[in-house]
Every structure is written in C-alpha cells, then in structure tokens.
Amino acid sequence: MKLANLSDEVVTNEAGHLTIGGVDALKLIAKYGSPLIVYDVTKIKNQINHFKQAFIEAGVPYRVTYASKAFSAVAMYQLITNEGLGCDVVSGGELVAALKGGMPAERIEFHGNNKLPIELEMAVDAKIGCIVVDNFQEIAYLDKILKEKNTKIAVVLRVAPGIEAETHKYISTGQENSKFGFDVHSGQAKKALKMLLDNPRMNVVGVHCHIGSQIFAAKGFVMAVDKMVSLLKEWNDEFDFSAKLLNLGGGFGARYVDSDEPLPAEDFVEQIIAEVKKKITEANLVFPEIWIEPGRSLAAEAGSTLYTVGSRKDVEGVCHFVAVDGGMGDNIRPALYQAKYDAILANKPNALKEQIVTVVGKYCESGDILVKDALLPITHSGDILAIPSTGAYGYTMASNYNRNPRPAVVFCENGEDKLVIRRETYEDLLSYDIGL
Ligand SMILES: *Cc1c(COP(=O)(O)O)cnc(C)c1O
C-alpha cells in the first residue's frame, strides 16, 4: 500500500488554517497558549481498531496492551480503558496514573529491568494482572514480598531472544547484549523459568519478548515467533510447561516523515498470527493467547505539536534558522536519537514552500534542533508551526530544562477540544524548591 504524503494529509478549513480533529490550530493556540500538544483522538481510536480487527478476523485469543510510556496521561489511560485495551507500565508513577485513569488492575502488566522493591510492592498490593519478570534480583525481591504478604501473582518471563531488529541501537532490545530480559543463549532464561515454576507464589502464565522499536517490516516479529515457539516446545518437553500467553512486545513503526513506510497495523498482526498458527501446530502445543504491546503506533501519528515562530537567523549560503517557543524540552527525540520530523506552517499550510530551514528550539544547546531540513514557506515571527507525529515519547520525555514549563495537552475529536493536561506554571516549577 502506497501511503499519501504527510503534507497531503494536512486538513484545512475555510480560513485556510490547519485543523486537528476538526479544530482550527490557531484557535487552539489562542485558547490554550503556545506551545501546545494536540491529539486527534479519532486517529488513536482508528489505530486501536486496526490492531484489534486483525485478531478478531483471525478468530484467535488476543490482548492488545498499550505500552503507556509512549504517552502516559490519565486521559490516555481512560481512552485506552474504554476501548477495551490493557496497558503496560514501567514504574510506580505509570502504575498510579493507569489506576487513576480507571484501568482495571487485572489488565495492567508491569515491565522494567530494575523494578524497585517499593514498585513491586505497589503492583502486588494493587493486584495487577501480571509482572513481566526481567532478572534474578527481581525474582528474589518478588518472592520476599509475596511471602511477607502471603499472596500470589501471575508472572510472565521476559526473554532476550537474540534477534536484532533493524532500528536505531538505542531502541533495539531483542539482541543478546540487551539490558532487558533473560538471555536464552547462555541458559539464563531456562534457569529463571525453573525458579519461577518451583515457586508456589508465582504463577507463570507466559513468555515475553520485545525486539525493538520503530520497526517497519514483519520479518523480525516472524523470527521472534519462531524463536519463542521453539523455546516453548523445548520447555514443554522438559518441564511440562504450557504457556497461556505469548507476548511479542511492541515496536510497530510509526510515520514521522514522508519517507517512513511502516507496514499497516493489520498487516503486522496478520503475519504474526499466521506464523504463530503454523509454528504452534507444528510443535503440537496448546494455542496461547497472543499479546502485543503497541506504544508509538497508537500515539505518535495522532499527536502534533504547535509552536509559535520567534526569531530567525539567516546566514546566506549557509543556513536559515527558524526558532520556535519550545524545543528539546518538549521533544527530545531529535537530539536523543536523530529522530526526523516534518513541519507545517499552520496558519497557511498551502502557501508555496520556497525555503529549506532548520527549525530550532529556545533551549541553550546547539543540539536543540527539531527539524534539520524543513521545506516551508517564508516564515515570520508570530506564525504558528505544526510538527506532526509528536504523539509518542514527546510529552513523556519532556523536561524542565532551562526552567521552561512543559506545554499543555489537548484532545480534539469531531471539532471539539478538551484540555487534558494543563500547562505548567512558574509556580509549579518552583514548588519543589525549598531553598536555604
Ligand atoms: C517500549 C516498549 C514497548 C512499546 O514500544 P513502541 O515502539 O512504542 O511500540 C512495548 N513493549 C516493551 C516491553 C517496551 O519496552
């Protein structure tokens, strides 16, 4: 399937302004201030349905678990809960937010390579659905907590299957030297499984792997299925272990710029299901529930950040800098992993694009670049610039560097807008400072 250009998807109104979820971008800035993160809620819902539909059509048991580190807002947990999804959390803070968003504890799974004893205790007390056990220390901590509280919990064994997805090295996680999960090759995974099976307080419900992020093709997932099912076969033979669920993680690619062409959600799911069916049948195992954990693919493309253009610096024949009122504090991804974005002039998206500029932020770092080469109309101070596809790992990675307050977040749907996270104030920023 050939995707349209991001710029072809720009929707404008009679005033010629960019609209998001049916709401005029300039009206949003006038109402809520700048910079502003805006979600088109319909896009999130559509993407959820694409994932779910493929499972429903195949008639296999499944669970879609939203990886909430992509965008962990109470409003997002509420939306995800209403859509029938589960979620994964990776910290006590995300757990508290998920519960506040009304996510049933039973649908929450807990991930992380260094879960703190206090976080494990919170998870046990909240009676969450399962803990994805990552390392030996965690098994010891969890065992102690369960003994003290005289209770049980479901656990999933996270393995590093030794598969490298073709993506940036900071976001690839399935390889043997990853910090996440039990290594298969060295026998650690098997040793961990045995410990869990021998522990009467831990009910091992399945296995998990996550091969990386921003993956565009199904091949890595298909390889992961092969590896995981062969492990399940081995462990079934040796320990009579039967997995109720097979969690294949997330990492389904999102479209940040025109040249990004990730497989559509349903195609990923179809190919995964086909491989699971084939391998499970060959291995003669009980068919497990298939779990996936999309994060960015649910949130990224639905979000856009609106900025106001401020100063310019033109060095003739060298480059043109256009500075906006946000930057690395609200979107660290370009500085952190050379992530690429496009920019749209929200007040006149259809004007002739005649200049290549570097969109920079207001932070005191030369690396504070949002878009390296943005093709834009000539911009002026006061213009509103939209950067699309900032809905994942934007707000959740935001900081207060340079004492800049974090922006507000608004959900838009069918022409209605709703503030879901208010803008930070200077008072908020100083509220932790005790002073001498
Ligand atoms: C980060 C993460 C995800 C989600 O990754 P995306 O690229 O946002 O889809 C899913 N599962 C695990 C275990 C993760 O660490």
Image (cartoon, grey):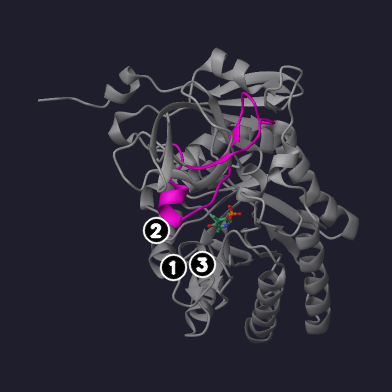
The Cα–Cα distance between marks 2 and 1, rounded to whole angstroms, is: 8 Å
- Measuring 66% from the left and 50% from the top, which residue is drawn there? 297
Q: Is residue 337 magenta?
A: yes
Label at residue 173: 3
Q: Are marks 1 and 3 in contact (CB under 8 Å)?
A: no
Q: Residues within 10 Å of mark 1 (few under 14, many from 20)?
A: many
Which part of the image, by quadrant, shows the C terminus? Answer: top left
Question: Whole-percent x and y of residue 191?
Answer: 49, 80
The Cα–Cα distance between marks 2 and 3, rounded to whole angstroms, is: 15 Å
- Amino acid under label 3? Thr
What predominant SS class does the magenta segment belong to?
Answer: loop
Q: Nearer the viewer, residue 41 or 232?
A: 41
Q: Secondary structure at mark 3?
A: loop
Q: Indicate left or right for 253 with 9 as reference.
A: left
- Amino acid under label 1? Asn
Q: Nearer the viewer, residue 354 or 428?
A: 354
Label at residue 135: 1
Question: Whole-percent x and y of residue 328?
Answer: 40, 41
Which of the two discs, 2 and 3, labels the residue nearer the N terminus? 2
- Measuring 75% from the left and 33% from the top, which residue is drawn there? 42
Residue hosting label 2: 114
- Measuring 64% from the left and 55% from the top, which residue is drawn there? 293
Extent of the magenta region: 330-357
- Measuring 40% from the left and 42% from the top, which residue is drawn there? 316
